Amino acid sequence: MGEWPLWEVFIRGQHGGNHRHVGSLHAPDAEKAVMNARDVYTRRNEGVSIWVVRATDITASAPGEKGPLFEPSNSKVYRHPTFFDIPDDVGAM
């Protein structure tokens, strides 16, 4: 018998906002992964939504690829907030 797949768990907190990664767990399927995530990561009723994603379905860049991956955005100065002049009457943003 093989090991159950690894699932990554994301919880959205009571106060809204984005889901954030809280940990990993093993479960036989998505439904059981959600139930196990609820039991393990929301014991104090701190979540309003749970996402589980099979770890094998996640594609990520490697830290060593940081330079080649992010360098092109450095040449696009219009993406930086300092590129724009904000009128004084707008106030703080």
Image (tube, rainbow, N blue to C red):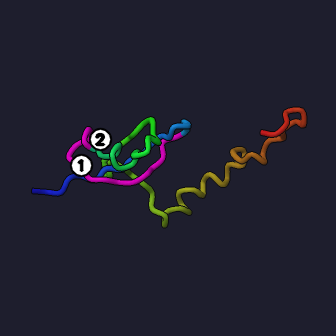
Observer-nearest of 24 and 45: 45
Task: Point out the frontmost of discs 2 and 1.
Answer: 2
For residue 61: magenta?
Answer: no
Which mark is on residue 35? 2
Is the residue marked by circle 1 packed among few (<14), some (14-19), or many (20+) residues within 10 Å?
A: some
Instruction: Check disc 2 and give the amino acid type.
Output: Met
For residue 19: magenta?
Answer: yes
Residue at mark 2 to residue at mark 1: CA–CA distance: 9 Å
Q: Is residue 15 above or below residue 54?
A: above
Question: Where does the N terminus fall, quadrant-wise?
Answer: bottom left
Which mark is on residue 76? none
Instruction: Check disc 1 and give the amino acid type.
Output: Ala
Residue 75 position within the rendered picture, expressed as x and y whole percent measured from the top left: 67, 53
In the rendered view, does 51 fall on the left or right side of 20?
left
Is the residue marked by circle 2 packed among few (<14), some (14-19), or many (20+) residues within 10 Å?
A: few
The residue that appears at 74% across and 45% down in the rendered structure is: 81
The answer to whether mark 2 and mark 1 are in CB contact below 8 A is yes
The magenta span reads 18-32
**Which residue is tagged 1?**
27
Q: Is residue 12 above or below residue 72?
A: above
The residue that appears at 39% across and 46% down in the rendered structure is: 43
Residue 76 position within the rendered picture, expressed as x and y whole percent measured from the top left: 68, 48
Residue 80 position within the rendered picture, expressed as x and y whole percent measured from the top left: 72, 47
Observer-nearest of 3 and 36: 36
